[in-house]
């Protein structure tokens, strides 16, 4: 590895690590289920409207389905 390319390879490694962590978080089913529990709690407490709850719930359920599909392949 040349002297000039060393900083770029280090930066590339950092970007790969950040991307991997973001993907891990995106596909963390436990975290998504915890978010579902949180929005149910907010709905019951009246701090979240049914409309907003429906939007958030649909997005979280879609993510869980995506995770399930990803794990099957």
Image (cartoon, rainbow, N blue to C red):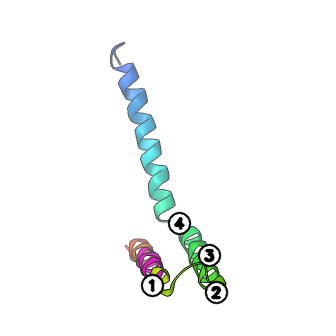
Q: Nearer the viewer, residue 69 or 55?
A: 55
Q: Which badge, 1 or 2, comes first in the chain's sequence?
A: 2
Q: Which mark is residue 38?
A: 3
Which residue lies under the disc numbered 1?
A: 51
Q: Could you tell me how far apart the alpha carbons at marks 3 and 1 are, in whole angstroms?
A: 16 Å
Q: Which residue is mark 2?
A: 44
Mark before the other along the chain sequence, 2 or 4: 4
Between marks 4 and 1 in the image, the one whose residue lies nearer the viewer:
1
Magenta-colored segment: predominant secondary structure: helix
**Element at badge 1?**
helix
What label does residue 41 carry, if any?
none
Closer to the camera in the image, 37 or 30:
37
Q: Are marks 3 and 1 in contact (CB under 8 Å)?
A: no
Q: Residue furthest top?
A: 3
Instruction: Give me the C-alpha separation between circle 2 and circle 3.
Output: 10 Å
Task: State yes or no: residue 63 in magenta.
Answer: yes
- Which quarter shows the C terminus? bottom left
């Amino acid at each position: 590895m040349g002297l000039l390319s060393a900083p770029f390879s280090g930066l590339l490694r950092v970007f790969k690590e950040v991307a991997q962590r973001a993907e891990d978080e995106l596909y963390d089913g436990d975290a998504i289920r915890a978010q579902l529990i949180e929005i149910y709690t907010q709905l019951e407490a009246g701090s979240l409207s049914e409309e907003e709850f429906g939007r958030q719930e649909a997005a979280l359920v879609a993510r869980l389905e995506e995770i399930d599909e990803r794990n099957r392949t």
